[in-house]
Amino acid sequence: MSNNNIRYFDNPYEYLKWEYSRQKNKKLDLKNLNIDILFSLIKNEYDDIEFYEKDKDLFKKLKEIAINLDIPITEQDSSGYFILKRHSENIIKIGDKNNIAIPNDIVLGTLPLNYLDAFTCVFPQGQRLIALSEGLLLFLYSMGRVVSSFFSKINDDINRYKSYVTFDFNSDSINKNLKMNKKGHEHFLETLIVYFAYENLSFSKIYYKEDANINLSAVLWDTAELFIVAHEYSHIILGHLPEEKDFIRRFLDDDSMLYQIVRNWSEEFSADSLAFQLTMANNQNTGYGLFGCYLGIEFLFACLDIIEKVYNIEFTETHPSAQMRIENLRRYFKNTLPETSQNILKGSRIIQEIITTLWDSNKDNFNYTINHIFKNINFKKD
Ligand SMILES: [Zn+2]
C-alpha cells in the first residue's frame, strides 16, 4: 500500500459514488434494462425453454421492485441493495423484539467489487455505513447451489397448504453423491475459477439452469447473507466502530482492501456471537428452524475457509481464520443451548465435510487451470 493517494470522504454517499466511479466495466442496472431484449440475447444459454420463460417473468418482477427501491445513490446496484435492505430490516425487527437498540440512521450500500467481505465504518459527521461487496452475494449463491446439489430429496410432497421437501442428511448417501455427482464437482470448480480468474460470477453457467434443490440452497445462502449483515450490525451495537482517524487510514490506495480495519480478534469473536444470536432468533421469521439457520452459518464459514485456502492465508492481523471463528461459534452454541445444540452440531458437520471434500478433490485441477489462465492472459491491473 502506498501513501500517495490518501482519499478522504465526507459522507457515505460520496464514498459509494467513488467506488462505483472506479468500476472498469460499467454494468447496466436492472431498473434500466430492457428485459425482452436481454432475454432474446441470452436465449441460447438456456437448455430448458420453460425455465427460460420463468426466469424472464422473474426478471420482469425484479425490475418492477428495482424501480420502486429507494437507493442511496443513483449508481447503486438495485439487486444487491434489495438483498442487503431485506436482511437489514430483519435484523432491526429482531433487535426490537429482543430490546437491542440499533441506531436508525445507518446507510446501506453494496459495492461493485468481487471481494468476499463486508464492512462497517463511521464518517466525520457521525454517519455510519454498512457496505457489502457484490462478489460475496454471488459467491454464496453459487456455492449454496453447489453444496445443496449433493443432497437427495426424500420426499417432495405438495399438499393443499404448503409444499414440504425433505433432504437426506445421511452421510453415506451424501458420500455416494460426492462420488457420483460429477456435475456438482464441475460447478464447484467453475465457481472458483470464474470467481478468482474472471472476478465476476454473473458469467457463471449456473444462472441458466433451474435449481432443483432450491429449498435447501436458499436456506444456505439466505442465512449466510443474513449472518454477514448481522455481524456488521453487531460491530455497531457493541460499539466497535473505529474513530475517525482510523477510518481515514483505510483509504490508502486505489487497490487496497478498503475494509481491512485493524480490529482485535476479540471484537471479531464477540461480533460473531451476537450475529449468531440474531441469526438464530430470525428462524421464527423465516421458518427455516434452528437447524436450517445453523446450517447456513456452518456453510458461510466453510465458504470463507475455501477462500483462505485459495489465497493460502490462515489468519491476519485483523481477522481470525474462518476455522477459528466457526469453532468459537460451536463452543458458544454448546454453552448457551447445551441440549438443543447437540444434534444440530452433529447434523450440520456434513456441510464442512462436503466443501472440504470438494476442495480436496478439485484443488489440483483448480491450481492447474488458474496457472494456465494467468500464463496465457496478460492480466493488467490498471
Ligand atoms: Zn468484523
Image (cartoon, grey):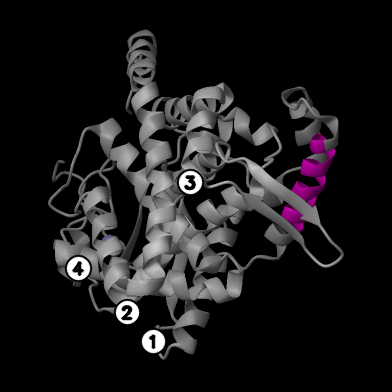
Dominant SS in magenta: helix
Picture layout, residue 376 above or below residue 382: above
Residue 129 visible in image = no
Question: What amino acid type should be assigned to the residue bearing mark 2?
Answer: Ile
Dot 2 beta carbon under 8 Å from ligand 1:
no
Residues at circles 3 and 1 in contact by the CB criterion of under 8 Å: no
Secondary-structure class at tag 3: helix
Residues at circles 3 and 2 in contact by the CB criterion of under 8 Å: no
First in residue order: circle 1 vs circle 2:
1
Dot 4 beta carbon under 8 Å from ligand 1:
yes
Secondary-structure class at tag 4: helix
Residues at circles 1 and 2 in contact by the CB criterion of under 8 Å: yes
Mark-to-mark CA distance, 1 and 2: 8 Å
Query: Which one is in front, 131 or 126?
Result: 131
Q: In the image, which residues are magenta? A: 51-64
> Residue 153's mark?
none
- 357 within the magenta span: no
Q: Position of residue 196 (x, y in %)?
A: 39, 30
The residue carrying mark 4 is 267
Q: Indicate the quadrant where residue 47 lies.
A: top right
> Residue 140's mark?
3
Residue drawn at (74%, 28%), measured in percent from left and top? 42
The residue carrying mark 1 is 100
Q: Residues within 10 Å of mark 3 (few under 14, many from 20)?
A: many
First in residue order: circle 2 vs circle 4:
2
Q: Position of residue 41 (x, y in %)?
A: 76, 27
